Image (tube, rainbow, N blue to C red):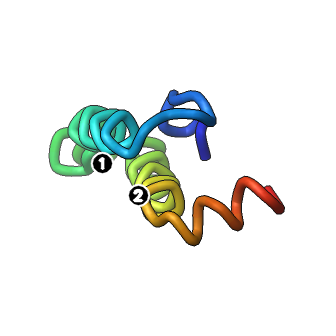
Amino acid sequence: YYDVLCVKPNASAGEIKKAYYKLARLKHPDKNPGDEECKKEFQEIGTAYQVLSSEDKRREYDKNG
């Protein structure tokens, strides 16, 4: 998920949030109508953010991948 958001594993919560918003705006389906690849990437970005923005989920991800 770090690669999805283009952040390092030691990124702060603020860095993760900033990267998420930047990528989400870029890949948002409303900005790319009909582009299925962007839609898929947008969903992946959302999933990555959900995991990395939660301390518990991030800890589990770091431990088990």
Q: Residue furthest left?
A: 30
Residue 65: quarter of image: bottom right
> Reading the chain from its start, which is encountered first: label 2 or label 1?
1
Residue depicted at 51% across the width and 29% down the height: 7
Q: Is residue 4 above or below residue 56?
A: above
What mark, if any, has residue 46 been given in the picture? 2
Q: Nearer the viewer, residue 22 or 53?
A: 53
Q: Is residue 2 above or below residue 54?
A: above
| Local SS, label 1 | loop
Residue 62 locus on image (x, y percent): 72, 53
Direction from residue 50 to residue 3 in the image, left or right: right
Residue depicted at 30% across the width and 48% down the height: 34
The amino acid marked with disc number 1 is Gly
Q: Residues within 10 Å of mark 1 (few under 14, many from 20)?
A: few
Q: Which residue is mark 1?
A: 34
Q: Residues within 10 Å of mark 2 (few under 14, many from 20)?
A: some
